[in-house]
Amino acid sequence: MNQKHIAVIGGGISGLAAAHRLRQLDPTVEVTLDESASRLGGVIKTTEKKGFLIEGAADNFITTSSTAIELCKTLGLGEELIQTNSGGGGAMVVSHGKLEPIPPGFMVMAPSRMWPILATKILSPMGKLRSGMELFVRPRKYQHDESLRSFICRRFGTEMFERLVQPLVGGIYTADPTRLSVAATMPRFLEMEREHGSLIRGMMNGRRHRKHDKEGRGGARYSQFMTLRGGMSRLINALGDSLPAQNLHLNSPIERVERLGNGWLIYKQNSRPVHADAVVMATPATHTARLLKGVDAKMSRRLRNIKYASCAVVSLGFRRDQIKNPLNSFGFVVPHVENRLILSCSFSSEKYVGRAPAGTVLLRVFIGGAMQPGLLRMPSKQLIEMAHLEIAKLLQVKGKPILRHITRQNHAMPQYHVGHRTRIHEINDRLGEHPTLALAGSAISGVGVPGCIQSGNNAAEKVIQELWKTDPNQDGSTTRRECIPAHS
Ligand SMILES: Cc1cc2nc3c(=O)[nH]c(=O)nc-3n(C[C@H](O)[C@H](O)[C@H](O)COP(=O)(O)OP(=O)(O)OC[C@H]3O[C@@H](n4cnc5c(N)ncnc54)[C@H](O)[C@@H]3O)c2cc1C
C-alpha cells in the first residue's frame, strides 16, 4: 500500500494542531510527530502544586477568533471551557508608584471613549490634551512599516505611549516597542488610520457597531478570553491523545532535513534518516532556520533574522488575608518609565475559578522580556524574591508566600520587528519552491494560541493539498520507507 507519510517536527501547540488537522483532512495518511523534549506542549505547561493550578506560559486565549474554541470543542473539551470571572475585570497600570485603573474602553492602543481618558489620573493635563489632538493628526501617506512607538507617539504623543500603550503591548509581546512592527502586530489600528483618518474615530465607530450587534444578535456569547477548567495543558493532552501513541516521538530532536525529489529525509540523532512525503516544521524560527539550512539558504537566513525574547514567570500564592489590596481587577502592567523590576502581574485566581484553594490567591509575575533581558541572569531564587518584593509594595502584601514557583521561558517569544511582514512574505515566496514543506508556529501568523493553531491548520492544509495533487502511481517517493541516502 502506498501510504503517504507526513512528518511534523515540534510538539508545541502549533505542531500538535497541524498533526491533528492532517489526520482530520486525510485519515489514510500516516502522521508522525517528533518533539525534542520529554513532553508535549512546548512553552505551554500547567503544573498543579499545593492545590494551585500554575500556568508556565499561556493561561488563556482570545476569543475574537473562534479557532481555539472550535478545536477545544472538536476534541470534546467544550464543557471544560470557562470564561473569565464576572466579578472583577479590567486591568490596572502602575502610575507614579501607585496602581490606577486603565481607563474603561481603552483597547491596547487607543481609547474608544473619551470621558475615561479625561478623568484618568494616569495622564497629565498636557498628555490628555495631546492625546485628544489625535482626532486632527493627518494619516500618514507613505506605506512602509513603522515601529509601534513611532506610530503611537505620532498619533497620540509620547505620554500616552509611555504610560499606557508601551506597558500594555509590552505585556503581550514582552517586546521593545521601538523595534516592534505596527503592521505585523496591530494591523487593525493601521486600517483605522487609513479608513477613518483617526484611531479615536475608528474605535468609537467600532464601539457603536458592537453595541448595535449586541442588541441585534442572539446566540452564544463569550468573554473576550477563555481557558480550560483544568488549565491549558488539557488542550495539549487532548491533542496528544488524538494521535496514535506509536507516532508520537518524544525525546526525539531532529538534526536536519534534506530534500529528496518531492519528498524529504528527516535526520535524527543516532538513527537512519526517515523518508517523508511532506514535512510541517513547527519549531521556533531559529531552530527551523538551522534544520533547513541545507534545503534553502535564503529562507534559512530570513528565519534566523526573527529574534526571540526571554522571560520568567514567577507564580506566588498567598492567603487572602495577607493582601490588603482588594484585587478587584485581573492584574496590572508596569510602564518601563516606572523603572521597576517586573513587567506585569496577573491575578490568576481572580481571573478564573479553580486556580487557588479557597481563601488563597495566586499571582503570576512576569520578568525580563526584550526591555530587561539582563534581569534573567539572576538565579531563580533571587528572581522569586524580587517578584515578591515588587508586588509586596504595590499590593500591600504581608508575610511570605505560601507557594513559590518559577518557569523560565528562554527565547520563547518571537519579536515581530519592523519588516516582519516582508520577511514572512519572502519566506512564503521561498516555500513556493518547496510545495511539500510548510511552516507553522508563533513566528508565522500571530504569537497567541489561536494564531498558532491557525498556523498549524494552514500548514496541514497546504501539504495535504499538495500530496493530493501527486499521482502515487507515477511517483515512487510517496511510499514511506526508512532509507539511507546515497552520500551517507
Ligand atoms: C510567558 C508566556 C505567556 C504567554 N501567554 C499567552 C496567553 O495568555 N495567551 C496566548 O494566546 N498566548 C500566550 N503566549 C504565547 C503562546 O503560548 C505561544 O506563542 C505558543 O504556545 C507557541 O507555540 P508553538 O508550538 O508555536 O511553539 P513552542 O511552544 O515553542 O513549541 C515548539 C516545539 O518545538 C520543539 N523543538 C524545537 N527544536 C526541535 C527539534 N530540533 N526537533 C524536534 N522538536 C523541536 C520544542 O521543544 C517545542 O516543544 C504566551 C507565551 C509565553 C512564553
Image (spheres, rainbow, N blue to C red):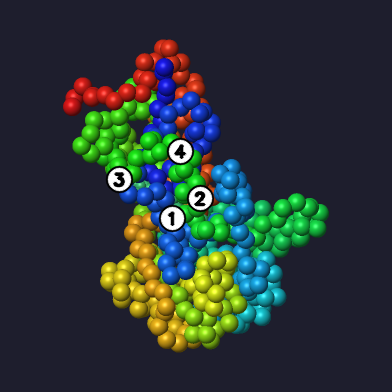
Q: Which residue lies furthest to the left in this view?
A: 488
Marks 2 & 4, CB-CB < 8 Å contact: no
Q: Measure the alpha-carbon separation of dots 2 and 4.
A: 13 Å
- What residue did someone put label 2 on? 235
In this rendering, which labeled residue sits more in front, label 1 or label 4?
4
User: Residue type at mark 3?
Assistant: Asn
Marks 1 & 3, CB-CB < 8 Å contact: no
> Quadrant of residue 303 in the image?
top left
Q: Is residue 97 visible from the viewing direction of this image?
A: no
Who is closer to the viewer here, 157 or 348? 348
- What residue did someone put label 3 on? 251
The CB of the residue at mark 1 lies under 8 Å from ligand 1: yes
Can you give x and y, in whole percent of width and height, for residue 372 in the image? 36, 69
User: Residue type at mark 2?
Assistant: Leu
- What residue did someone put label 1 on? 44
Secondary structure beneath dot 4 equals loop
User: Residue type at mark 1?
Assistant: Ile
Numbered mark located on residue 243 in the image: 4
> Quadrant of residue 34 in the image?
top left
Secondary structure beneath dot 3 equals loop
Can you give x and y, in whole percent of width and height, for residue 278 in the image? 40, 29
